[in-house]
Image (cartoon, grey):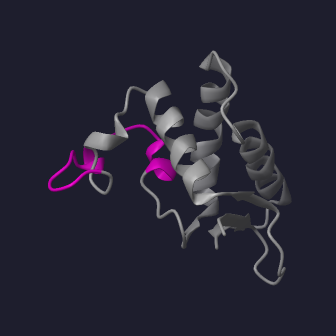
């Protein structure tokens, strides 16, 4: 069981996947690179957290997304990709699946068919 990504809905297989725990760790590490403490953000903490509206960085597109369903639209992927590449560049360690996610999103964008990254 885990989080699977695909970009063409009619395919019945996942092109890329995380365990749910792995995706949480991924987002924690990614957020840390941008000075965001997920444990203080709405949706990650008990009670009132910091509103995502205060985060003006496009990295929030993936940090403030459901971990089990929905999609990230093509136009948001175009905004997210440079932030993920920047994260890979500034990280002093390998973040699990970051490079693979970058390549996956690049493939979606190269298709230039207004596809989405679908969470299943």
Decide which of 69, 111 is in the foreground and name it.
69
Q: Quadrant of the C terminus?
A: bottom right
Q: Which residues are magenta?
A: 45-63
Q: Is residue 113 above or below residue 24?
A: below
From the top left corner, tell me how far across and down residue 45 is, in percent: 26, 51
Q: Residue at x 53, y 35 (%)?
A: 30
Q: Is residue 41 above or below residue 119?
A: above
From the top left corner, tell me how far across and down residue 10 is, in percent: 81, 84
From the top left corner, tell me how far across and down residue 105 is, in percent: 74, 51
Decide which of 110, 91 is in the foreground and name it.
91
Left or right: 88 as drawn, with respect to 61: right
Decide which of 38, 77 is in the foreground and name it.
38
Q: Is residue 34 above or below residue 5?
A: above
Name the quadrant containing residue 26.
top right
Q: Quadrant of the N terminus?
A: bottom right
Residue 100 located within the stretch drawn in magenta? no
Q: How many numbered circles does the render carry?
A: 0
Decide which of 93, 108 is in the foreground and name it.
93
Q: Is residue 86 above or below residue 81?
A: above
Name the quadrant containing residue 70.
bottom right
Left or right: 70 as drawn, with respect to 94: left
**Prevailing SS of the magenta stretch:** loop
From the top left corner, tell me how far across and down residue 110 is, in percent: 83, 53
Residue 61 located within the stretch drawn in magenta? yes
Left or right: 112 as drawn, with respect to 31: right
Q: Residue at x 65, y 65 (%)?
A: 2
Q: Residue furthest left?
A: 48
Q: Residue at x 67, y 27 (%)?
A: 88
């Amino acid at each position: 069981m885990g989080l699977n990504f695909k970009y063409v809905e009619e395919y019945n297989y996942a092109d890329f996947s995380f365990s749910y725990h792995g995706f949480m760790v991924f987002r924690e590490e990614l957020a840390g690179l941008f000075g965001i403490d997920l444990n203080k953000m709405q949706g990650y903490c008990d009670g009132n957290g910091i509103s995502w509206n205060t985060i003006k960085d496009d990295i929030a597109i993936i940090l403030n997304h459901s971990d089990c369903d929905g999609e990230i639209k093509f136009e948001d992927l175009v905004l997210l990709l440079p932030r993920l590449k920047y994260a890979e560049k500034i990280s002093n360690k390998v973040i699990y699946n970051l490079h693979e996610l970058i390549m996956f999103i690049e493939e979606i964008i190269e298709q230039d068919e207004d596809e989405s990254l679908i969470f299943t």
